[in-house]
Amino acid sequence: MRSWMQRRSRDRHPIGRETGMAGPRSAGLACLLAALALLFGLACAPPDSTSEAGSGETGSIGILVTDGPTDEFAAINLTVTGIELLGGPEGNVTVFSGHETFDLLRLRDVSELFSLTDDVPTGRYAKIRLLLEDIELVVDDGTGGVETHHPRLPGNGKLDLHPRSPFDVRPGEMLLLQIDIDAEKSIHAVQTGAHKYVFRPVVFVEVLQSIFAGRLVRVHGLVRNIEANSASFELCHLRRPMPWLSLSGAHEDLDEDSHPPIRRCIDVGLLEDGSLFDENGDPARLADMENGDPATVIGHVTPAAGRLQLLAELVLLGQRGTFTRLTGTVTSELDPDDRFDLHLDRAQGFVSDTTLAVQLFEGTRLFARSGMELSRDQIEIDLRAAVTGVIALSNDEDDLIKAAVLILDVEGPTIDRLRGVISRLDEAARRLEIEDLETSERHCVDVPERAGIFVVSQENGESAEVELGELALGNVADIYGRPGSSSEACFSARVIIAFPDFDPNG
């Protein structure tokens, strides 16, 4: 890991900062990043640069998985058995095969590195296929217990995702794909039929090509090859079956017969303002970390020179589960001791009405759900929050959680939804009209250029990002956005999801 990767000061954080006009410093940084992008093969190549089929050249694919926030369920357990790239020059390519179950709700604030695959044939690919075995919805039953539901999977568990445009795998390069399975927009309660819930998967696919694109990423493994001078190390023995991508030959002594093989490593560079916490939840230093220590790293991924590198905002030492994630609502202002109170949501292992003190440290990092870094003066009463840290129980003092990272929902509550049949469409004016399914009331909807538009098939499990003109009259659509500023103003859409084969009973 090159030392320049760790040089990022707070006043130049490239995540969501509104810096106004670019001055000499920002212009110089832009030039540096552009030069580095060219050096490490991160620049976007023109469409005709894709290698032809049969060239024998290969690249690498990294899959990240995340989820949009929802508070309706205690857990959403999704079982994935495969991920494939479709429409390539040499046919379909499998980039994950196995049996992995994970809780989508644990991915509300971060992405998780799901798989890394090298030796992917170069070329242009049109679709991604997810192979699902089951989805389990865990719901608080209101009496302290839970009930589970298993909605039917569309397409016999095969979900085909169509990004807005094809993507290229290039020789010797790493391509990152982020799959956002939006649970809030995918799972709907129904009053009739065989199931209480239906699953109409709404999945966003994003090709990540810049260093700080996408959400924060979380990876767990074992620390190895610590380099104090460059504040870097390797994270090995990764949880999931990922092939070894190191090109340096530094792992020749590693045991390939271990289970899982330890030769699954990625490079980690601690950012200059990155933080470390030990297994007790207290601030730590790089010197406190030893080879073989288990650690969870939270940061930003970048593909460089055909391999993955992780720029660490946080390093949490300890076995998986050492640090607890709790959600709730802020109920007090930050006091002089850097503490505030968090009223915890139900179904988190506490009694139904629990308030816990949150202790911040100098190294505690604050972010919005989008990944934008926040300041402490943005902690406000009634904000939704998620804190990751270590719970400290005491007989003499108040119980508290030592916070390593705090995620604040500064973007506000969930946006409103309209559901109805598309009855009019004016592509030139970027406006449509829908008729409410229940009341037959008509609503006009403005569709800004930045709005995401998707068509999702309930039967064959296909999800495609489309242009406004590709929507069809008569289709049922869910429209997420904000009401107009006046009674005469149209609803403003952020996301439109059309279902050509909509069945209200699932």
Image: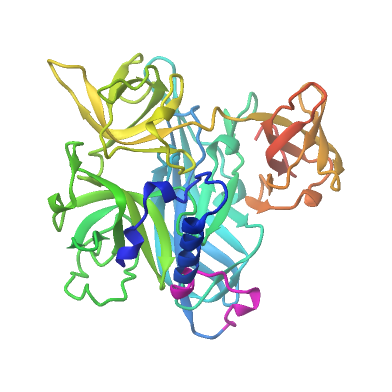
Q: Main secondary structure of the magenta part?
A: loop
| Residue 353 appears in the picture as rendered | yes
Q: Is 401 in the magenta?
A: no
Q: Nearer the viewer, residue 6 or 195?
A: 6
Q: In percent of the image, x 57 and y 69: which residue is there?
A: 44
Q: In percent of the image, x 36 and y 51: which residue is there?
A: 9
Q: In percent of the image, x 49 and y 42: which residue is there?
A: 370
* Above or below for 43 versus 145: below
The location of residue 386, given as percent across then percent down, is 39, 31
Q: Is 48 in the magenta?
A: yes
Q: In percent of the image, x 54 and y 29: which residue is there?
A: 412
* Above or below for 299 versus 281: below
Specify the segment rendered in magenta.
37-53
Q: Nearer the viewer, residue 413 or 271?
A: 271
- The number of callouts visible is 0
Please state, as top left, top right, bottom left or bottom right, where the N terminus lies in the image: bottom left
Q: Nearer the viewer, residue 420 or 26?
A: 26
* Above or below for 52 versus 12: below
The location of residue 447, given as percent across then percent down, is 75, 41
Horizontal relation, residue 191 to residue 78: left or right? right
Q: In the rendered image, which quarter is residue 320 located in? A: top left
